[in-house]
Image (cartoon, helix red, strand yellow):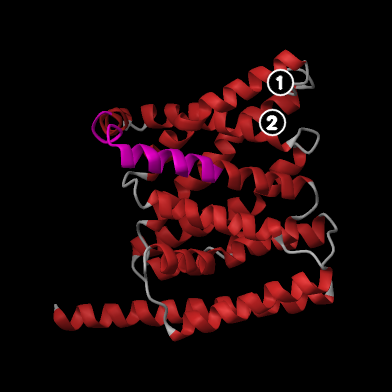
Amino acid sequence: MKQNEQTGMIYTAFSYFLWGILPIYWKWLNHVSADEILANRIFWSFWFMLLFLFFTKRWKAFTSYIKTSLTKKKQLLALLLASLLISANWFIYIWAVNTDQMVEASLGYYINPLVSVLLGVFILKESLSKAQVVSFILAAAGVLILTFSYGDFPWIAMGLAFSFGLYGLAKKMIKVDSAIGLTLEMMTIAPLSLIYMGYLYSEGTPSLFTISWGTDLLLMGAGAATAIPLLFFSKGAQQIPLYMVGFLQYIAPTITLILGVMVYGETFSFTHLISFMFIWVALAVFTGSRIRFARKRRREAKLSA
């Protein structure tokens, strides 16, 4: 493996590791409501990213993109949609973690790659391979087993998978550096988060600056906790093949699942095991097909060179 690919794999794997252990951070804030955590996460992420762009000398590129691209209605609509979708995804995830539903949250990120492909088929009119069809059937069987066994559809898992999948589609319309993109998304939604935080103060029910220094630092630090994994990911993903990124992305939900069961004592029954096994096999088939396709494309590129 080339040196830059090794470095890229380390950065990307570390970013998914950080995303995997992020529930620990939200657990430290489980005395704060999910909506207030989300408002603080958005608000402080925006300011953290502004400082990051300034110190990494990307401020000019940031302001230039605002001037040239955000005058287009389609770009503005995509940016607003991306901002709302990632906010919804964050809220569902924080709420799931702090209501002891990390197992189902991990399920959402296991099936997210399959949901993204499904959205591509219906929205972008992409075609499905035989391996992808088999993957969908297996994953659907896993979801149905959970639904019929417990009499309750896994709304958290599907909400996370579809909100993040749709977020990915919206991001396709915003062709910009990931750090600048995150800053723009937070800039779009930050005014709403500030209004909500002001509302909490007017009602006399805020957690920021009223409970303890520890709570204040955690709420303000949510900006860095959000941005740092993304910055590692953006640096690493540029240096490795897409199929390798797809393989490494399962690190995060695996860690979350282990934390939920082994650390926080969530239930993982035999039914859960059967359901997850269907989904894990589906992901193995799906990932294997992507790796074979990527290798075939590489061989064809070498022959034509």
Residues drawn in magenta: 67-86
Q: Where is residue 226 in the image (x, y as percent from the top left)?
A: 56, 40
Residue at coordinates 63% horizontally, 24% vertically from top-left? 196
Does 78 appear in magenta? yes
User: For the residue marked with disc 1, what is the amino acid?
Assistant: Leu
Does 76 appear in magenta? yes
Return the residue at label 2. Answer: 36
Question: How many numbered discs?
Answer: 2
Residue at coordinates 81% horizontally, 56% vertically from top-left? 263
Q: Position of residue 286 (x, y in %)?
A: 50, 78
Count neighbours of disc 1 (C-alpha within 10 A) and say few if under 14, some if 14 to 19, many if 20 or more: some
Locate the C terminus and report the quarter of the image it occupies. Answer: bottom left
- Identify whether 52 is placed above or below 254: above
Q: Where is residue 264 in the image (x, y as percent from the top left)?
A: 82, 54
Question: Do the CB atoms of the residues marked 2 and 1 lie less than 8 Å apart?
Answer: yes
Locate the N terminus and report the quarter of the image it occupies. Answer: bottom left
> In the displayed structure, does residue 265 sit left or right of residue 102?
right
Which of the two labelled residues, at mark 2 and mark 1, occupies the earlier sequence position?
2
